[in-house]
Image: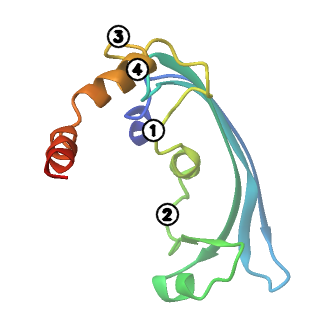
Amino acid sequence: MARLKGELLEPFGVAEFAFDFSMNEEHLPVITGQVTAQVRSVCQRCLAPMELFIEGSVRLRVVRDENKAAQLAEPWEPLIYAGGEQLALVELVEDELLVEFPAICLHPAGECRQPVNGSSSQETAESTEKSNPFHLLSQLKTSRD
């Protein structure tokens, strides 16, 4: 799972999956199931390590080409498989975990450690007020009046 490994703090974790390979009412192949993983990543707010639980449901309809994939209705996602080769379950699990992986990893509100720059949010707000470039403009405007 090289693509998922690039998103993690440590190159290991626990991933589990349960897939059901069957035929739908139209006698077309479908894959349904669940994927879960417990991994460690980095909080993008405080840059501290964090535990991350990834969970997702799988609803794939096996199709042979892009045209058939474009015709699929909700809730099915296409799995383009032309046949002839074995389906790589590891890649399928990795794909589903990457879909569920958050774009930005963050601790829940209130659980982050001290901000990276070492200042508190109140100090940051005060320094922003002091270095406001429009402050001089407001003084110029009041002096003209």
Q: Earlier in the sequence, mark 3 or mark 4?
A: 4
Question: Answer yes or no: do the residues labelled 2 and 1 have beta carbons within 8 Å?
Answer: no
Residue located beneath label 3 in the image: 118
Residue located beneath label 4 in the image: 47
Q: Earlier in the sequence, mark 3 or mark 1?
A: 1
In this view, the mark in front (4 or 1): 4
Residue 119 visible, this angle: yes
In this view, the mark in front (2 or 1): 1
Helix, strand or loop status at disc 4: loop
Q: Earlier in the sequence, mark 4 or mark 1?
A: 1
Residue 83 image offset from top left, x and y in percent: 53, 72
Is residue 56 positioned above or below 65 on the image? above
Instruction: Give the residue type at disc 1.
Output: Leu
Point out which mark residue 85 bears.
Answer: 2
Point out which mark residue 4 bears.
Answer: 1
Helix, strand or loop status at disc 2: loop
Residue 38 image offset from top left, x and y in percent: 63, 27
Foreground pick, 54 / 22: 54
Crowdedness of circle 3 by 10 Å Cα count: few (<14), some, many (20+)? few
Residue 145 left/right relative to 62: left
Is residue 103 positioned above or below 49 on the image? below
The residue lying at 80 percent from left, 86 percent from top is 26
Question: Answer yes or no: do the residues labelled 3 and 2 have beta carbons within 8 Å?
Answer: no
Calculate the distance from the C-alpha at mark 2 to the C-alpha at mark 1: 23 Å
Crowdedness of circle 4 by 10 Å Cα count: few (<14), some, many (20+)? some
Crowdedness of circle 2 by 10 Å Cα count: few (<14), some, many (20+)? few
Calculate the distance from the C-alpha at mark 3 to the C-alpha at mark 4: 12 Å
